[in-house]
């Protein structure tokens, strides 16, 4: 089967490029402990990830403790910035895939804060990405299309030659809202049935499959 030509690959970060959920959960429970709130099961915290740090912490502190949200945010940010590379790494297959597309413009569009995004990507090695936009850059959070439209505008790339690769319904819906095609990944944190219901254009089980689909 002929591979599909694309000019720009936009990647989500958590659950797509990096396995980061353990460090996130650790910082959430450190924050809850520091505030004297009960820690949460790790698996429960994994389910809170994907909509940006503010929603993550609102869910973590719980409905009855929203008055302590700002305090929680401050503690979490300081701790996570220090510990965001303790266990976080690229998923298997990501680095060879990025090397394969070394001459292809690539960008990051993540609901994660841009500060953490930069620290993590700088810490993990070579810089493969021409542009990065995070959830606190003022373009809204996926599934809003703002950050994806901004990336294409900045890099001068047409929608029909751009793809988004992500692991959540936010990515699939965000890509479709921005008018671009989406490749969902089945190895990340997203709920498979919910992702399939959003009808991504492709669904892969490992990063190397991108090399078989796109040129």
Image (cartoon, grey):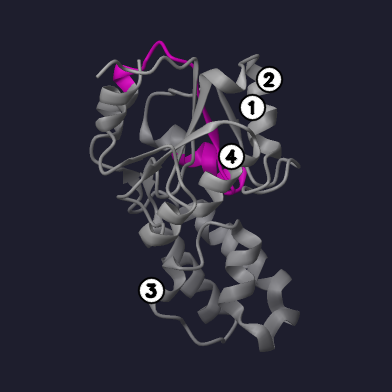
Image: 52 above or below 108 = below
- In three-dimensional space, the C-alpha distance between marks 2 and 4, rounded to whole angstroms, equals 19 Å
Q: Is residue 27 left or right of residue 148?
A: left
Q: Earlier in the sequence, mark 3 or mark 4?
A: 3
Q: Residues within 10 Å of mark 3 (few under 14, many from 20)?
A: some
User: Toward which corner of the image does residue 202 lie, by quadrant?
Assistant: top left
- In three-dimensional space, the C-alpha distance between marks 1 and 4, rounded to whole angstroms, equals 15 Å
Quarter the C terminus occupies? top left
- Tell me the element at label 2: helix
Q: Residues within 10 Å of mark 2 (few under 14, many from 20)?
A: few
- In three-dimensional space, the C-alpha distance between marks 3 and 4, rounded to whole angstroms, equals 31 Å
Q: Earlier in the sequence, mark 3 or mark 2?
A: 3
- In three-dimensional space, the C-alpha distance between marks 1 and 2, rounded to whole angstroms, equals 5 Å
Residue 102 inside the magenta-drawn segment:
yes
Q: Earlier in the sequence, mark 3 or mark 1?
A: 3
- Tell me the element at label 1: helix
Residue designated by label 2: 154
User: Toward which corner of the image does residue 23 lie, by quadrant?
Assistant: bottom left
- In three-dimensional space, the C-alpha distance between marks 3 and 2, rounded to whole angstroms, equals 38 Å
- Tell me the element at label 3: helix
Residue designated by label 1: 151
Q: Earlier in the sequence, mark 1 or mark 4?
A: 1
- Tell me the element at label 4: helix
Residue 53's disc number: none
Q: Nearer the viewer, mark 2 or mark 4?
A: 4
Residue designated by label 3: 42
The residue at the point 53 percent across, 41 percent down is 117
What is the span of residues highlighted in magenta in the rendered image? 99-120
The residue at the point 45 percent across, 61 percent down is 24
**Residue 119 or 141: which is nearer the viewer?**
141
Residues at marks 1 and 2 touching, judged by CB atoms closer than 8 Å = yes
């Amino acid at each position: 089967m002929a591979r599909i030509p694309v000019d720009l690959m936009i990647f989500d970060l958590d659950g797509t490029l990096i396995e980061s959920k353990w460090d996130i959960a650790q910082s959430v429970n450190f924050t809850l402990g520091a505030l004297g709130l009960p820690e949460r099961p790790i698996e429960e915290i994994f389910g809170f990830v994907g909509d940006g740090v503010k929603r993550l912490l609102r869910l973590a502190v719980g409905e009855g403790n929203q008055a302590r949200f700002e305090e929680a945010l401050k503690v979490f940010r300081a701790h996570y910035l220090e510990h965001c590379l303790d266990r976080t790494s690229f998923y298997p297959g990501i680095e060879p895939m990025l090397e394969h597309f070394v001459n292809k413009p690539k960008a990051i569009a993540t609901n994660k804060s841009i500060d953490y995004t930069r620290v993590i990507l700088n810490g993990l090695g070579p810089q493969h990405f021409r542009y990065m936009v995070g959830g606190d850059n003022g373009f809204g959070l996926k599934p809003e299309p703002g950050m994806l439209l901004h990336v294409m505008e900045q890099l001068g790339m047409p929608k029909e030659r751009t793809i988004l690769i992500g692991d959540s319904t936010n990515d699939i819906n965000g890509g479709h809202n921005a008018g671009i095609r989406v490749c969902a990944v089945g190895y990340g944190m997203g709920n498979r049935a919910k992702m399939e219901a959003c009808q991504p254009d492709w669904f892969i089980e490992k990063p190397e499959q991108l090399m078989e689909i796109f040129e």
